[in-house]
Amino acid sequence: MNVIMKFCRVIDWINERVGRGVAWVTTGLVAVVFVDVVMRYLLNSSYVFTQELEWQLFAFIFLMGAGYTLLHDGHVRVDIIYQRLGPKGRAWINIIGVFCFMLPGCLMVIITSWKFTHNSWAIMEGSPDPGGIPYRFLVKGTITVGFILLTLQGLSLGLHSLLQLVGLETPKEEAS
């Protein structure tokens, strides 16, 4: 069981570090949007590069931050039943949700995005628009990487829940 606990701690540590790095990218996104708004409304000018950078930074933040969000229980959840359950009931819901729904869904995205991402990297895909970002392959790579991080964090959540059920770990709200 110590191996499982260590495995979960490593996954949690990785997603914590990635999430903190992604948080800094949000500052960059705010700056890019601010510059775009100023250019568009005060200077009546806009660049394709700036607009593409906005959506690419947003995609990066969303994809790379998903595992961090799951680590901190920040995903939207319909918790009409979940909030009324005790720790063991919540652990069961987490296990069922992770292993029956989340992991298969994430694996499907990883498998289907792999060739798409590989092809984009192979041709060093850039923007088809004049003046656009020449490195579109980078953001496409975050599809696969982001879902791998989310898959790992889902696995960690499922294993944490399993450890709670067998009494080797206390739930986060009880531990703090």
Image (tube, rainbow, N blue to C red):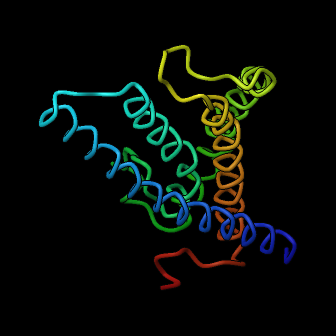
Q: Position of residue 116 (x, y in %)?
A: 72, 20
- The quadrant of the picture occupied by the N terminus is bottom right
Q: Position of residue 27 (x, y in %)?
A: 38, 58
Q: Position of residue 112 (x, y in %)?
A: 73, 22
Measured along the vertical axis of the image, is residue 173 above or below residue 18?
Answer: below
Determine the residue located farthest toward the left in the rendered image: 42
Q: Is residue 112 left or right of residue 81?
A: right
Q: Nearer the viewer, residue 110 or 46?
A: 46
Quadrant of res 115:
top right
Q: Is residue 61 left or right of residue 15?
A: left
Q: Nearer the viewer, residue 151 or 123?
A: 123
Q: Position of residue 160 (x, y in %)?
A: 67, 66
Q: Nearer the viewer, residue 173 or 64?
A: 64
Measured along the vertical axis of the image, is residue 143 above or below residue 82?
Answer: above
* Residue that appears at 46% across and 61% down: 23
Measured along the vertical axis of the image, is residue 33 above or below residue 11?
Answer: above
* Residue that appears at 27% across and 44% down: 35
Q: Is residue 65 left or right of residue 126?
A: left
* Residue that appears at 46% across and 66% down: 86
* Residue that appears at 62% across and 23% down: 126
